[in-house]
Amino acid sequence: MSTEPVELGGLPVPRMDFEEFLAFGREALIRADVPVVINLPEGIRGLGRDGVAERLGQMRVTLFTEPSDKQNSKRWTTKEIQLSEFFADERYLTDPGTWNRIVSNIRNNPADVNAILGFDAEELFDYQRSLNAANLWISHKGVFTQSHFDELENFNIALQGRKRFVLAPPGFWEYYPRSIRQGFGDKSQAFDFDNVDPRRFPRLVDKLAERRELILEPGQMLYLPLGWWHQAESLEDMNINMNFWLKDTKIFRRPYVLGVALYTAAFRKLKGVYNYQPAESAS
């Protein structure tokens, strides 16, 4: 593993070649519990906008919409549309007052996953297991995902466009979590780690001394461990990523992550909030 930095600021982010990743092993990487950028082979670049539109244009996907405000405190609104509609309607890509992004868990469609990535991902990520996911993410320039943590291990592959990530190590009260009762326990009151008020969030300022920052380029994969806080911003007019969320027993060593995950799952089910689980039957 190389420690040559790919970061913009903060602590260095290790990186490795894909062959090193295969030799090291997914489970060993998960046990190491630090973010890593993995360079995919030159021959593997996956599909961009045109290829995804041709293969999946008729698929029903979930459109997330919110005001283009990094301090927005409300949930995204969601609706189902055909993917072709998202690509065809320029308002989804150019409206300066709105952020739009597509999310679709296509774990039950391994042929599509493999075609999009350009390699067979099932053996590598075992994404069809219960509670795992293979998500397609599509967004336009400026779309911002506020600071939060995931209860699953995350392998994120950039297919088109670039995304800037800010990462910070596990913790809970240091990050001033939002209301657990309202289903926001995985999110920080400091929505943007680039602009933290030291008077309101002094513990967070100290914690962010351990932050990492990087830009994920096409042909790269980011491993983001369970429980690590992060935010992401899309940098190009069209950004397409595939990520794999994988369950792991590590969650039992981070009880706050487990507790928040269980409550949030129940809250989302009760309120009908999108839960990243595929509705389609296996093909």
Image (tube, rainbow, N blue to C red):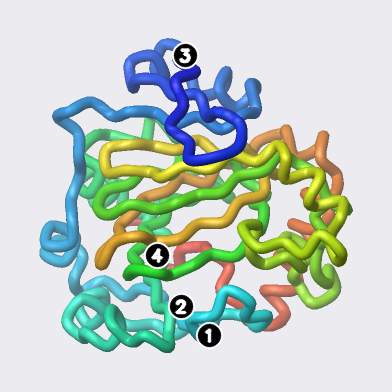
Residue at the location (72% across, 79% down)? 270
Task: Answer left or right for 49 relative to 194.
Answer: left
Please give the residue where the numbered disc 3 appears in the rendered image. Answer: 1
Residue at the location (61% across, 58% down)? 194
Residue at the location (36% across, 58% down)? 136
Pointer 1 or 3: first along the chain: 3
Q: Which mark is residue 77?
A: 1
Pointer 2 or 3: first along the chain: 3
Amino acid type indicated by mark 4:
Ser
Secondary structure found at label 1 = strand
Q: Is the Cβ of the residue at disc 1 closer than 8 Å to that at disc 4?
A: no
| Front tag of 4 and 2 | 2
Secondary structure found at label 2 = strand
Kindly indicate the quadrant of the structure image that contains residue 38.
top left
Q: Is residue 86 above or below residue 231?
A: below
Q: Is the Cβ of the residue at disc 4 closer than 8 Å to that at disc 2?
A: no
| Front tag of 1 and 4 | 1
Amino acid type indicated by mark 2:
Phe
Please give the residue where the numbered disc 2 appears in the rendered image. Answer: 64
Q: Is residue 12 above or below residue 159?
A: above
Q: Is residue 146 above or below residue 157?
A: below
Give the CA distance from mark 4 to mark 2: 11 Å
Q: Is the Cβ of the residue at disc 1 closer than 8 Å to that at disc 2?
A: yes
Give the CA distance from mark 1 to mark 4: 15 Å
Kindly indicate the quadrant of the structure image that contains residue 219.
top left
Pointer 1 or 4: first along the chain: 1
Task: Answer left or right for 198 relative to 15.
Answer: right
Please give the residue where the numbered disc 4 appears in the rendered image. Answer: 104
